[in-house]
Amino acid sequence: MSVREATPVLECRIAALPWAEIERDLWTDGAAKTPPLLTAEECAQLRELYEQPERFRSTVVMARHNFGEGEYRYFAYPLPPLVQTLREQFYAFLVPIANAWAQALEGRACYPAALAEYLRQCHAAGQSRPTPLMLTYGAGGWNALHQDLYGALLFPLQLTCFLSRPGIDYDGGEFMLVEQRPRAQSRGLTFVTAQGEIVIFATRQHPLRGARGYYRATLRHGVSRVRSGNRLTLGVIFHDAR
């Protein structure tokens, strides 16, 4: 089955995810992990895209910028069908949560129901470069804690899709989140993931309820050192870049 043929089936799998549990975890921790969603075949097809340079608009070697040790590539438009499906379908399920977060923190909903309309807003603001990307880490690779902010407009949630098999393709390389709450010490979260699983997490901040209403908890994400093998992931960011 081709990636294009598989996308309607993927849409059904996304719709069948335990969205109530995901929403609960996002409100509590700013992050949630799905059950395995992508098949081994889909993961292999996505990994193969990394060796097709015509699919990408740019490549970043992390060490040159003190970002870590590894490499990532931003897709060019048009996105591969499987990546486009993930971006569109997850946006549709996440936008109600994004608007609830915006209401809690800013007193208003900000995000349109469809990804296409949101991207039109990004492009009108000068953010027209696609941001979905693939990241690869070899032995010794890691990624510093950071946020994916590419302009004034940003969607408050994003995805990392895990395409390699821990314990077989690589060891180490845990996905890390560090949460900073006002007037409190930082809190770390670590996700041990299986192939095909997806972590959904806050791009910049998420709301937490306090004694006087909601306040902002800042989140940064990164990757611990890969001890051996090769780790490949797909990042799905919903806002485009300048």
Image (cartoon, rainbow, N blue to C red):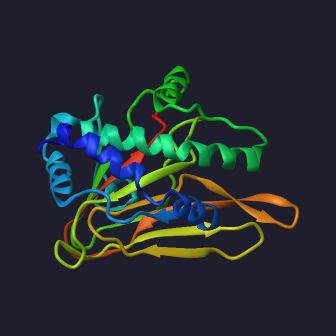
Q: Pinpoint residue 68: horizontal percent, then vertical percent.
A: 36, 63
Quadrant assignment, res 54? top left
Left or right of residue 83: residue 34? right
Left or right of residue 20: residue 218? right
- Nearer the observer, 9 or 187: 9
Vertical order, 236 against 240 (above or below): below
Q: Pinpoint residue 21: horizontal percent, then vertical percent.
A: 54, 64
Looking at the image, which residue sits at the far top?
124
Q: Quadrant of the N terminus?
A: top left
Q: In this view of the protein, can residue 137 be seen by the observer? A: yes
Left or right of residue 4: residue 91? right
- Nearer the observer, 162 or 174: 162
Which residue is pictured at 38% across the width and 34% down the height? 130
- Nearer the observer, 197 or 235: 197
Looking at the image, which residue sits at the far right?
212
Q: In this view of the protein, can residue 242 be seen by the observer? A: no
Vertical order, 236 against 22 (above or below): above
Q: How many marks?
A: 0
Which residue is pictured at 15% across the width and 50% down the height? 45
Which residue is pictured at 60% across the width and 49% down the height? 97
Which residue is pictured at 60% across the width and 63% down the height? 24
Q: Pinpoint residue 32: horizontal percent, then vertical percent.
A: 50, 64
Q: Pinpoint residue 6: horizontal percent, then vertical percent.
A: 21, 43
